[in-house]
């Protein structure tokens, strides 16, 4: 099959991928070892495959990898700073918002993008945001608490829209 070369910035590092024109971004991320993006429904309904593309959450199962050419992708593997977890990751751990973890990368990346746009969210706004990430384990009480705590921390540390 014909292959094309694309260039992306993945987790702050330039990468070059050889792909087929019809390859799906989720498949290529997982082929390249970025397994934090999970395969769930493959229809855009569950949010398990969420990654950030130029800072915005997208369903990697619904996007051709070729559409990412020249863009910045952030997966959960790029969120921590070395051994230091991102504050949103810390908040999810501190609030017991992780059980099997299948939905967690998508939730956390969605939260990151959300808090950059909503420095002082209401609980209703947080519930609305998390409704795009289906979780079979926890229900949503703990993740909502974690997001509210991360928002509060970002505000108190003056990080505001750059949570
Ligand atoms: S696997 Fe992409 S939204 Fe469910
Ligand atoms: S923690 Fe298991 S699906 Fe959400």
Image (spheres, rainbow, N blue to C red):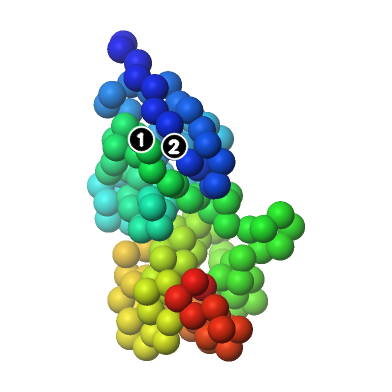
The spot of residue 26 in percent (x, y) is: 39, 39
Q: Nearer the viewer, residue 154 or 1?
A: 154
Q: CA distance from mark 1 to mark 2?
A: 6 Å
Location of residue 90 with respect to 63 vertically, above or below: below
The spot of residue 77 in percent (x, y) is: 58, 49
Give the mark, 1 or 2, whose residue is nearer the N terminus.
2
Q: Which mark is residue 69?
A: 1
The spot of residue 31 in percent (x, y) is: 49, 30
Q: Secondary structure at mark 1?
A: loop
Q: Secondary structure at mark 2?
A: strand
Which residue is depicted at the point 53% across and 85% down?
155
**Viewed as shown, does residue 24 lie left or right of 148?**
left
Q: Is residue 121 visible?
A: yes
* Residue 56, image quadrant: bottom left
Q: Is residue 24 visible?
A: no
Q: Nearer the viewer, residue 163 or 92?
A: 163
Location of residue 158 with respect to 9 vertically, above or below: below
Which residue is depicted at the point 50% across and 42% down?
10
**Viewed as shown, does residue 97 lie left or right of 141?**
right
Give the residue pinned by disc 2: 8
Q: Are marks 1 and 2 in contact (CB under 8 Å)?
A: yes
The spot of residue 101 in percent (x, y) is: 54, 58
Location of residue 69 with respect to 84 vertically, above or below: above
């Amino acid at each position: 099959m014909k292959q094309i070369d694309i260039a992306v910035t993945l987790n702050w590092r330039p990468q070059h991928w050889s792909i087929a024109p019809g390859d799906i971004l989720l498949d290529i991320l997982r082929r390249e070892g970025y397994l934090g993006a999970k395969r769930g429904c493959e229809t855009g309904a569950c949010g398990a495959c969420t990654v950030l593309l130029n800072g915005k959450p997208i369903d990697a199962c619904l996007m051709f990898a070729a559409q990412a050419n020249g863009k910045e992708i952030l997966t959960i593997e790029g969120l921590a700073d070395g051994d230091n977890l991102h504050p949103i990751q810390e908040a999810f751990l501190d609030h017991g918002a992780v059980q099997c973890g299948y939905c967690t990368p998508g939730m956390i990346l969605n939260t990151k993008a959300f808090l950059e746009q909503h420095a002082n969210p209401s609980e209703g706004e947080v519930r609305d945001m998390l409704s795009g990430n289906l979780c079979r384990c926890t229900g949503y009480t703990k993740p909502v608490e974690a997001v509210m705590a991360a928002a509060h921390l970002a505000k108190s540390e003056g990080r505001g829209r750059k949570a």
